Amino acid sequence: MNLELKRIIDQVSRDKGIEKDLLVGAIKDAIRSAAKKKYGPRLEIEVEYKDETGAIEVFQYKEVVVEVKDPHQEISLEEGREVDPECEIGDSLGFKMDASAFGRIAAQSAKQVIMQRMKDAERDLVYEDYKDRKGEIMNGIVQRSDPEGIIVNLGRTEALLPPMEQVPREVYHKGERIRAYVLDVKRQTRGPQIILSRTHPQFLVVLFEAEVPEISEGIVQVLGCAREPGSRSKIAVSSRDSDVDPVGACVGMKGARVQNIVQELRGEKIDIIPWHPDPAKFATSALAPAQVSRIILSKETQSMEVIVPDDQLSLAIGKRGQNVRLASRLVGWKIDVKSESKYSKSLKEGYLSILSIPGVGEITASLLHEAGYSSAREVAETSLEDLVQATNLTEKKAAALINAAQEMAKEGGLEAPTE
């Protein structure tokens, strides 16, 4: 029996990667627990394990007293001196117990404690193995689906692909292989929970890192990504080497590299865009394939008005506004797309509204318009300092213009230009 116990401990330690001391400690705890269940919680015992033989020895300690009230914890001086002739009142004497006396209770307790310690140790090992793998792509096999999401078998443990991290219209069946981005690893009482995602923009970035050597080598950088999972994505790239075309590197020979990623994302369209530090030039590329006529920037509000030829308007906006929405996310600016005819109309209406301010002639109206004031309302809402700085008008003239525009506003004579 002793050798059998030693063999079990050695095998469990080797197969499960759990330290021997942890298993031996579990067995000692189980025997202490069983002894106290049988003889009372105040029982004082010590358990020893002999690693060479696998033998377990249990010692019970009793206090030497004048009058014995609890024979499980106390012993008389007379009985004590039969064991140790030199013992005195108050000494503690150890007696070897028969470990088999605990029978089924000890065995069951030991089994439960060992199983629990094994589970705890396995959970800790799994957590330690996966905690630093956030941001990686992992391969797994679909195990099952439940209300919480798709359960994916990663080999050593299971992971969860929640509904909100699943691409719309993607369907996976039991036993099917799946690749996903490790979004988070949480330590929980029931074990580590690994959260996967196929919708996160970073999933696309890491796919490109795996497919394009120039990205993994640091020659090409991914500087932005915007996704509408399952439909369309835009990714911005830049090169640290003037001889390397970042877009061409990502597309690959005959489009092979990007096509591999498109297949992994089950047909999601991917636009690869050259990054540019100038927001206007970056936005022009991001709105491709639409052509851009001009861009008016507002750095204060981080917004831009993009003017496109009339026949390019629907292309620039995209189906249900998708193209301009993704471009806006990629650039990080609010983008408002207008056709040339609509923009010309609003310019004309704005100019006419400025011209309608009392005391303003064509020369002053043109001056205000060229200074960036697109309507009488903007003149009414500007500050004296800004107007003087933008137009070089005298403070007296500028103040008179603002007052006149504000009077028009009070009378209800200002209308915003037609959108």
Image: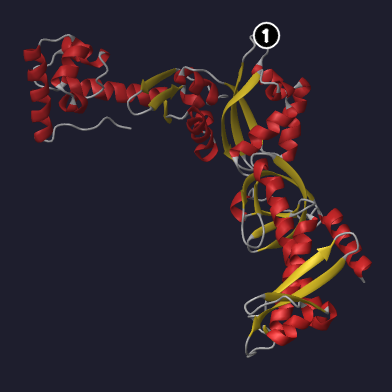
* Count of marks placed on residues: 1
> Residue 305's spot in the image, x, y percent?
39, 25
348 left or right, relative to 324: left
Q: Nearer the viewer, residue 3 or 278?
A: 3
Q: Residue drawn at (71%, 35%), measured in percent from left and top?
A: 262
381 left or right, relative to 184: left
- Give the crowd class for mark 1: few <14, some 14-19, many >=20 residues within 10 Å: few
Instruction: Please tell me whether residue 155 is drawn above or below residue 404 in the rendered image.
Output: below
The quarter of the displayed image where residue 134 is located: top right
> Residue 207's spot in the image, x, y percent?
70, 34
Quadrant (top left, top right, bottom left, bottom right) of the C terminus:
top left
Q: Identity of the amino acid at label 1?
A: Asp
Q: Residue drawn at (69%, 88%), measured in percent from left and top?
A: 71
> Residue 172's spot in the image, x, y percent?
74, 54
Instruction: Please tell me whether residue 178 is drawn above or below residue 256 in the rendered image.
Output: below
Instruction: Please tell me whether residue 325 is drawn above or below residue 83 in the rendered image.
Output: above
Instruction: Please tell me whether residue 42 is drawn above or below residue 114 in the rendered image.
Output: below
Q: Residue drawn at (76%, 69%), measured in percent from left and top?
A: 47
Asked which secondary structure carries label 1, the reply is loop
Can residue 113 be spotted in the picture? Answer: no
The quarter of the displayed image where residue 266 is located: top right
Quadrant (top left, top right, bottom left, bottom right) of the N terminus:
bottom right
Q: Nearer the viewer, residue 106 or 384?
A: 106
Can residue 246 be spotted in the picture? Answer: yes
Q: Which residue is mark 1?
A: 243
Q: Residue drawn at (77%, 26%), measured in percent from left and top?
A: 256
> Residue 24's spot in the image, x, y percent?
78, 63
